[in-house]
């Protein structure tokens, strides 16, 4: 006790470090969750963050608009052309719709019920990112008050973003596909019989392996979720950027680039 | 410096870090405002570590809100504070270069510590990947700290062990 009194600052610091180590250990044993205290803090913070994030998004768009005016004009022209093409395509598709309806009736007759996304979708804005530059965990401004639950699927127009890890009243923590603990079963869009598992590599990319070593997968192949596990079938994951055979593991390993542009991500949709 | 000002400064940095800092995000790299303020207060102010200690709470709250594991950033802040206290004894605090060196070293050691701790908790991020981004983190933190330095130096008291102290 005398020694502690004589070394007051050191003792206090050591006490704090020990307490913090216990915090880390507790959070590690809880699987990375922040617990009841974290949920309380997050609820208060997200109420403050929400308007600021909205302002940041708006201000960011304005700045980007100023500095990228010429590219925006160019993009606008391209979009006009694309729009014209899509209109034509729409006409063609409308003509095929009747045929599809008839086939749909036929599928019911065979008691075939593919995933139809019956769950509701909730739109949300990203309000905070963790300090890592891999975008593997982030917080959105919608939570259990909007019916969001753990393991709900998070997507945007480009593809799969991740799943909900933790929820509070007005916030939810999302673990992205770039997180190394988030394994996803996939199939190749080009040939759906080729399946495998991918997960984040902790470096901003996605890596994985094929179930069948003899399957032919090539650079540029698009991967979609297979429907096994919590992710519904058919959501785009990313494009294959490299294929290697690992002699030691005897596995065909792939590197995948996510179709989602994480660096400019602002809004997401959560599927329940 | 007073506790009231320190609390306000850290609270401001905390809110900014979680929301508006993303506005100046380049390739996912943003300055660590809490770390910059901890280094600055500890280095520039007499008994600054007392006020910088609020940064430990701020880092803990940041971990609670966005971190994967709670507490790692806070332990990192304590290490940086201890290191800065040791460095300030042998460096001229009025020299801007000293401040730049301390900020760069602080950023590097802090990120290295976080990586070591995360690696102990089975995080697969490679050291090469962490090192690859260090120059950007250092540059960003130095830039932000320098702005703070220019603003705060007017408030800093002259240090008793400075050569020209009278």
Image: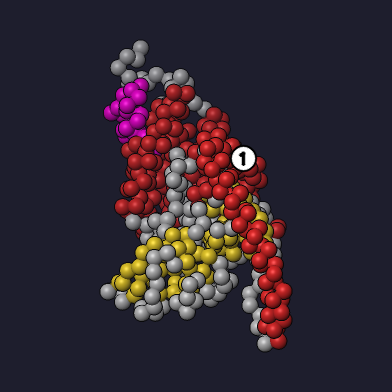
Image location of residue A18, percent across then percent down? 42, 51
> Is B122 left, or right, of B25 in this rendering?
left
Residue at figure coordinates x 42%, y 42% from the top left: B77
Residue at figure coordinates x 36%, y 46% from the top left: B133
Whether B41 is drawn above or below B79: the answer is above
Image location of residue A130, percent across then percent down? 50, 50
Bounds of the magenta span? B79-103
Image location of residue A147, percent across then percent down? 69, 62
- Viewport quadrant of the N terminus of chain A: top left
Q: Nearer the viewer, residue A108 or B26?
A: A108
Q: Main secondary structure of the magenta part?
A: helix
Element assignment for label 1: helix
> Is A243 left, or right, of A271 in this rendering?
left
Q: Is residue B84 visible?
A: no
Q: Nearer the viewer, residue B115 or A87?
A: A87
Residue at figure coordinates x 59%, y 64% from the top left: A153
Q: Nearer the viewer, residue A243 or A85?
A: A85
Image location of residue A59, percent across then percent down? 59, 37
Residue tagged 1: A58
Q: Is residue A244 visible?
A: yes
């Amino acid at each position: 006790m005398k020694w502690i009194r004589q070394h007051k600052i050191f003792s206090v610091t050591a006490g704090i470090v020990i307490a913090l180590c216990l915090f880390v250990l507790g959070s590690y044993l809880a699987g990375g969750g922040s617990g009841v205290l974290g949920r309380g803090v997050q609820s208060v913070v997200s109420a403050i963050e929400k308007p600021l994030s909205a302002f940041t998004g708006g201000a960011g768009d304005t700045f980007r608009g100023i500095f990228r005016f010429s590219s925006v004009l160019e993009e606008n022209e391209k979009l006009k052309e694309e729009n014209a093409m899509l209109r034509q395509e729409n006409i063609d598709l409308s003509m095929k719709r009747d045929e599809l309806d008839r086939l749909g009736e036929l599928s019911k007759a065979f008691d075939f019920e593919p995933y139809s996304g019956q769950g509701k979708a909730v739109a949300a804005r990203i309000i905070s990112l963790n300090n890592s530059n891999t975008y593997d965990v982030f917080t959105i401004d919608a939570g259990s008050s909007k019916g969001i639950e753990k393991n709900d699927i998070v997507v945007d127009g480009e593809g799969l973003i991740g799943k909900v890890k933790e929820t509070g009243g007005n916030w939810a923590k999302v673990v992205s596909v770039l997180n190394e603990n988030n394994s996803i079963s996939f199939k190749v869009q080009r040939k759906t019989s080729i399946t495998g598992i991918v997960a984040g590599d902790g470096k901003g990319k996605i890596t994985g392996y094929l179930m069948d070593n003899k399957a032919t997968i090539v650079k540029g192949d698009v991967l979609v979720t297979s429907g096994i596990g919590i992710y519904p079938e058919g959501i785009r994951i990313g494009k294959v950027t490299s294929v290697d055979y690992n002699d030691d593991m005897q596995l065909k390993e792939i590197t995948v680039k996510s179709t989602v542009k994480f660096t400019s991500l602002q809004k997401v949709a959560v599927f329940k | 410096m007073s506790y009231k000002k320190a609390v306000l400064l850290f609270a401001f940095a905390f809110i900014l870090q979680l929301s508006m800092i993303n506005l100046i995000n380049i390739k996912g790299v943003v300055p660590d405002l809490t770390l910059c303020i901890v280094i600055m207060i500890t280095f520039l102010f007499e008994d600054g570590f007392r006020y910088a200690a609020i940064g430990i709470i701020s880092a803990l709250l940041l971990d609670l809100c966005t971190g994967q594991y709670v507490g790692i950033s806070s332990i990192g802040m304590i290490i940086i504070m201890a290191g800065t206290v040791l460095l300030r004894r042998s460096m001229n605090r009025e020299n801007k270069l000293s401040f730049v060196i301390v900020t760069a070293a602080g950023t590097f050691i802090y990120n290295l510590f976080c990586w070591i701790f995360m690696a102990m908790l089975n995080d697969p991020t490679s050291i090469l990947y962490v090192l690859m981004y260090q120059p950007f983190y250092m540059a960003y933190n130095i830039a932000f700290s320098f702005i703070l330095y220019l603003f705060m130096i007017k408030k800093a008291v002259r240090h008793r062990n400075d050569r020209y102290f009278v």
